[in-house]
Structure formats: C-alpha cells, structure tokens
Image: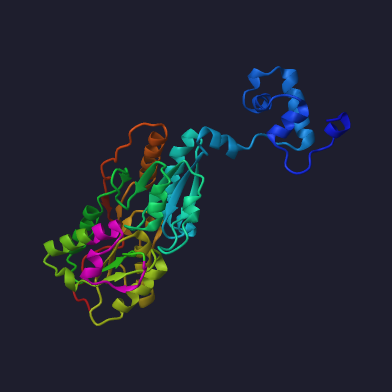
C-alpha cells in the first residue's frame, strides 16, 4: 500500500483488521490500544488512535468482542402482554426496576421481548442475542417458553410458569387472595364478585365458570382464585354462586367494562376482589360511573400494592407484595447462574393486607 493510498479513508466500514493492515501492525496490537493500553508504548497507542480517527474507526465491535467471550452483556426478559405493558403497568415497572438495579452491578443490560401469540413466529426468541432469560408471568405451555429453553442459556422465572429445574421467584398467591376475601367477609359482605386477569392465552372476556377457573393456564390466576374460593367457603359462601368475571387484559378499562353490568343488575355485589391493582382501579372507575359509593355501597380490594394503589380515590385496599425487592431477587439468581454458581428458588415472598379507604362494613340495606 502506497503512502497516498494509506492517507485515503477506506471505503465502507473500517474494521479492526483493516486498520491493523493499514498501520502495518498486528490485529492484537490495535485491540490493545483500546482494551489494554498498558501493553503499548504511549507513542504507538497515540499513532494507532490518530490513524483510526482519520479513517473513521470508532473502536472494536462490542458485539463481536462479546461473542468471542461467549457473552453479549444483555439479559432477555420475555414478557406476556406486549412491550408497552412493561412500561405502562405500575407493577411491571417496579419489578423491572428491581431487576435492572441488580443486573447493573455487573454492567448487564435488559433486552425486552414480547412472547407473542401462541401460534406466532418465534424467531425473535430464537435469534435474540442474550446471555440469559427471565420469563415474566407466562402461561403454562406457551411455545415461547420452549423456544427460550432450547437456547441453552440460564433461565429464571418470575411468578410463572413453574418449570422443572428452573429457579422461580414467586409469592403465596393463594394465601394473599384468601386474606383479601377474609377481609371482606369479616366486614360482613356476602354479595361478593371477583375480577380476574386473563386465565388463558385466548384472552376472552366475560363470566368464568368453575371449569374455566380450574383449567386456567396462568398459574398465578389459578392460585389466587383457589385461595379466594377457600376463604369464601370458610365464610359460608357458595363459590359457584360468586360471579367471577374474566378480563381480556390486565388494565383498568377492561375491569370497568367487566364490572359495569354487575353493578346495574338486580343483586349488585357489595364487595369486589380484584386479582390485581389495575383491575381494582377499574372497579373504582366503574363504581364512580354508576353512582355507587365506595366504600359506602361497594368495597374493593386489589392485589400487588403498586405505586398507583394509594393514589386512587378512595385509596385502594390491597394485598401488598415487595415488588422491587422481588425484581432484585430475580436479578441475583441470574447473576449467580452467569457466574457459574448454584441458584435456588427463594421462599415465596411474604404478603400483607394494606387496609385503605376502599373497604368498609357491608351496607345494612343493600339494594
């Protein structure tokens, strides 16, 4: 290569190898200028960096460097309800915040992927450049779970599904739901209704009978409904007669639409147990739209104690779980697996009932 040719920028993208050839040094020498400067003399390093700037070379490709190490510096999070849900649902935001805080200790980032429909294309999972997977609240048997497992990367589950040999960070969903229903029955409520998150990937809306409840492929929903049924039976209620309404999405608008017909019926409920705070918020909206006083005529309990729960009017009584801490627990398991250390599922996180203004005694004369 002549001096004049060397002075001209290389056409296209300049690679580390091309820069090394231009300078007449080894590829390792150029790499050391960026990654191990103590291995070079200051004069040689300055010459390499100056020529790199002339040619428009910004440094070694971090993706290629990561692949040579067997790492890319990212953990994939497989979410169920679409990427927007991860940023709009207050509960999901807290969980992901805790996960990110833990992983940043090792300089690792997050790469969010939507699982997609059960019959959808899974190439985004099969081709994702990740060092490990976090499966966040997916239904039993979802093909995206299988695709992630087939990658052979470390896997940690947040809540669901339960998989053989895979660590999971969960809570006592049945116990928390039982506490919520006991709170309502202890207040004298006997006309109970339940608002449920989706029970299966088909995401239908409407009344859910016992068969639908028991066959739910979302383990969290299945457990919360079972705990609620146990507490209701303990108070002498016939669970089969309790209206359980499934919402196609876990958001306030779905809950508002689901509860409105019950409030307009001849025997409206005096109490609602919502399986999430998002649904609890929607129940409050439905009551307001129907002119039903909360908690005078209708008591409402949610689940999660997300940041939005205390800000409703009235503030939402809810089953509290340590959201950010649970995200950090998932991150700690991922870090352990990536470091080659054993990772064991922690005990289910402790839950507590937080009583706020949305619950009160059953009305003496319900209409």
State left or right for residue 38 relative to residue 57: left
* In magenta stretch: residue 209: yes
In the picture, measured across the screen, residue 41 lies left or right of residue 78, that is right
Q: Is residue 72 above or below residue 364?
A: above
Q: Residue at x 52, y 39 (%)?
A: 72
Q: Position of residue 148 (x, y in %)?
A: 41, 49
Q: Is residue 260 visible?
A: yes
Q: Nearer the viewer, residue 236 or 39?
A: 39
The residue furthest bottom is 266
Measured as percent of width and height from the top left, residue 348 is found at: 26, 45
Image position, residue 211 (x, y; %): 22, 69
Question: Hey, which quadrant is residue 361 in on the image?
Answer: bottom left
Residue at (72% x, 18% y) in the render: 42
- The residue at the far front in this view is 1
User: Magenta region: which residues?
Assistant: 202-225
Percent position of residue 63, x then y: 58, 39
Front-most of residues 351 and 103:
103
**Residue 37 on the magenta span:** no
């Amino acid at each position: 290569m002549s001096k004049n040719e060397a002075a001209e920028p290389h056409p296209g993208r300049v690679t580390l190898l091309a820069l090394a050839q231009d300078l007449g040094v080894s590829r390792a020498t150029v790499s050391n200028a960026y990654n191990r400067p103590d291995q070079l003399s200051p004069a040689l390093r300055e010459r390499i960096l100056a020529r790199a700037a002339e040619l428009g070379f910004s440094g070694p490709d971090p993706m290629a460097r990561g692949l040579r190490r067997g790492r890319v510096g990212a953990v994939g999070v497989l979410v169920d309800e679409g990427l927007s849900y991860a940023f709009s649902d207050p509960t999901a935001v807290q969980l992901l915040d805790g996960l990110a805080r833990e992983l940043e200790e090792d300089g690792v980032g997050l790469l969010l992927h939507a699982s997609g429909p059960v019959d959808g294309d899974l190439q985004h999972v099969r081709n994702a450049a990740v060092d490990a997977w976090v499966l966040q609240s997916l239904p039993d048997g979802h093909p995206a779970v299988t695709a992630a497992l087939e990658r052979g990367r470390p896997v940690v589950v947040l809540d669901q599904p339960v998989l053989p040999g895979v660590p999971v960070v969960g809570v006592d969903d049945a116990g928390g739901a039982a506490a919520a229903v006991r709170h309502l029955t202890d207040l004298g409520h006997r006309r109970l209704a339940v608002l449920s998150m989706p029970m299966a990937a088909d995401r239908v809306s409407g009344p859910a009978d016992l068969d639908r409840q028991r066959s739910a492929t979302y383990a969290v929903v299945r457990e919360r409904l079972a705990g609620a049924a146990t507490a209701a039976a303990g108070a002498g209620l016939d669970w089969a007669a309790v209206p359980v309404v499934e919402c196609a999405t876990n958001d306030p608008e779905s809950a508002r639409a689901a509860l409105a017909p019950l409030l307009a019926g001849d025997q409206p409920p005096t109490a609602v147990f919502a399986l999430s705070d998002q649904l609890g918020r929607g129940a409050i909206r439905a009551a307001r739209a129907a002119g039903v006083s909360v908690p005078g005529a209708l008591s409402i309990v949610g689940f999660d104690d997300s940041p939005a729960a205390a800000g409703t009017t009235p503030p939402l009584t809810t089953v509290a779980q340590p959201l950010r801490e649970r995200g950090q627990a998932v991150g700690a398991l991922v870090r352990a697996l990536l470091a080659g250390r054993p990772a064991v599922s922690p005990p289910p996180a402790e839950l507590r009932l937080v009583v706020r203004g949305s619950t009160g005694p059953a009305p003496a004369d319900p209409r």
